[in-house]
Amino acid sequence: MMVRPARGATAVAAVAALSVTAAACSAPGGSGGGGKGRAASSAVVGIAYEPDTLSPLLGYGKDGNSKLFDGLLTHDADMELKPALAVALPEVSADGRTYTYKLRDGVRFSDGTPFSAKDVVFTYETILDKKTNNASKTELDAVDTVEAKGDDTVVFRLKYPYAPFAERTVLPIAPEHIAGEQDVNTGGFTTRPVGTGPYTLVKWSKGEKLTFKANPRYWGGEPKVKNFTMAVIKDDDVRATRLRSGDLDGAILPPDLAATFKSDGDKQTYAARTFDYRVVTLPTGNKVAGNTAVRRALDIGVDRKAMVDSILHGAGKEAYGPVPTDSPWFTEGTERTHDLAKARRILDDAGWKAGEDGIRARNGVRASFPLWYLTGDKLRQDHALAYASDAKKLGIQIKVESGTWEVIEPRMPKDAVLAGGGSPADPDFDQYTLLKSSLAGDGFNNMARYDNARVDEALDAARRTDDHDRRKAAYDTVQRELVKNPGYTFLTHIDHLYVVGDRFGDLTTQVEPHDHGLASGPWWNVEKWQPAS
């Protein structure tokens, strides 16, 4: 699934990020000295992006770890499903079309109101409502009905067996008594949520920070980290500086900046394996980027290994599609060998001839197009510049530009974008919204406007069966079609690196999606941290 950082954070330019000093990064109890001046029960971490909304009805926390909410299920450190608001994993009917969940007793929302099955029904029915602006609702396409059986049982009936359905029940549950009384898309719940999770929101200063406090009513026990702040610092260098100065207890950093903390004795670096990829969208609406020969040439003309070595410093792997090469869903034989000579022949044979300046043209169309990346994102910038450099060797001119999402989004139908995506839970989540032609132009879904009938057919076939072999065959078809007509140039799968002060002890990470930092990283289970006194 294509996922983008939220637009609110991207409106903050690098200069503004420099002003996010004590105001954005200080925690209750003071600061300084690697967090030594802060209370043991407080933690401040630096993240790169903030969400558009805090409402699960609009997509917030759909992969779990929302901190403010719980789903029926959640993931452990090994990404195995385990109960949360449900007391056990679901009972599934023999035909794979009925899922029954028994709910945990005594759970209350943070305002004291009891949680019940009606809140679950409300959440799923609202997401599926046509008027709700949730870009990920296609992941619940299989749901036919949601029914409450008393206060403690919920039954989902599906239109067809949907193998990853249980994974979608990590989705956070919203309170009907609050969210049901407001406009789902614009009501106050989108910025002032109430949930059953381990933390409650104290304040959201958009573009600066989100401040949380421990929920004393949390069914899992009140967290020992009582005050938790996520400082929104878009610029990687500024985030590293704030961490080094002691304003932050931890931060997500690109590999080169994370490496500068290796000799820091009171900090630890954590590497999380991910499904997070960096990719160049090649919009069908662009006469150059939408040309199949150009797409194929770029796909084998790009030096992915050099990007892994020089940009990621080895913290990642080459990407040939949304599925990482070490995933059991990866299709062997779809790796692309870096071959400049073959790439040039593809362009020659398609009639793209080099001009006096070395840039190719065909039928009066010059082989040139813009490539946008998000301002302040060093990894995207480095990927974009390397991609443009490789393209120039083929006679293709790529003009690298930076901007906020407000600048980039209107240009996506015709301009290429250095984007990101990836979800570890199931290949359907990775691929359907990325490639399905009917979703072209639907916000940040199918950003390249990719249109391939065989891919559409395979995506539908894969999500409408729970037979593993049939699903694998369908996703093999998708990956092979991406070799014939890429639509996107996948570059790398990146590891996420976090540097955290050691006063919180040894921490863990999960396998992470693209959407990282906010509820992933070593603070994925901050409610269980045991800070040193």
Image (tube, rainbow, N blue to C red):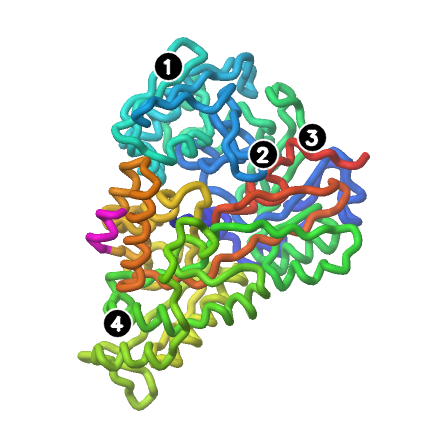
Marks 4 and 1, the one that precedes in the sequence: 1
User: Which quadrant of the view contains residue 399?
Assistant: bottom left
Gap in Å between the C-alphas at discs 2 and 3?
15 Å
Q: Amino acid under label 3?
A: Lys
Q: Which quadrant of the figure has residue 277? A: bottom left
What's the residue at 45%, 16% (across, down)?
102
Asked whether, in this view, residue 218 is left or right of residue 475, the answer is: right
| Residue 484 coordinates in the image, percent (x, y) | 27, 64
- How many tags in the picture? 4
- What x and y, as percent, mark residue 533? 81, 34
The residue furthest front is 469
Give me the C-alpha separation between circle 2 and circle 4: 51 Å
Q: Which residues are magenta?
A: 451-458
Picture disc at residue 226: 3
User: Residue 293: image x %, image y %?
Assistant: 26, 72
Magenta segment includes 454: yes
Residue drawn at 29 percent across, 46 percent down: 442
Secondary structure type for disc 1 = strand
The reply to whether discs 4 and 1 touch (Cβ–Cβ < 8 Å) is no
Which residue was labeled with disc 2? Answer: 203
3D distance between C-alphas at marks 1 and 2 = 33 Å
Q: Which residue has dot 4 on it?
A: 293
Q: Can you tell which of label 2 and label 4 is closer to the viewer?
A: 4
- The local crowd at label 2, few if under 14, some if 14 to 19, many if 20 or more residues have their Cα within 10 Å, is some
Name the secondary structure under disc 3.
loop
**For the residues carrying marks 3 and 4, which lies nearer the camera in this image?**
4
Who comes first in sequence, dot 1 or dot 2? 1
Q: What residue sits right under mark 1 in the picture? A: 148
In the rendered image, is residue 479 in sight? yes
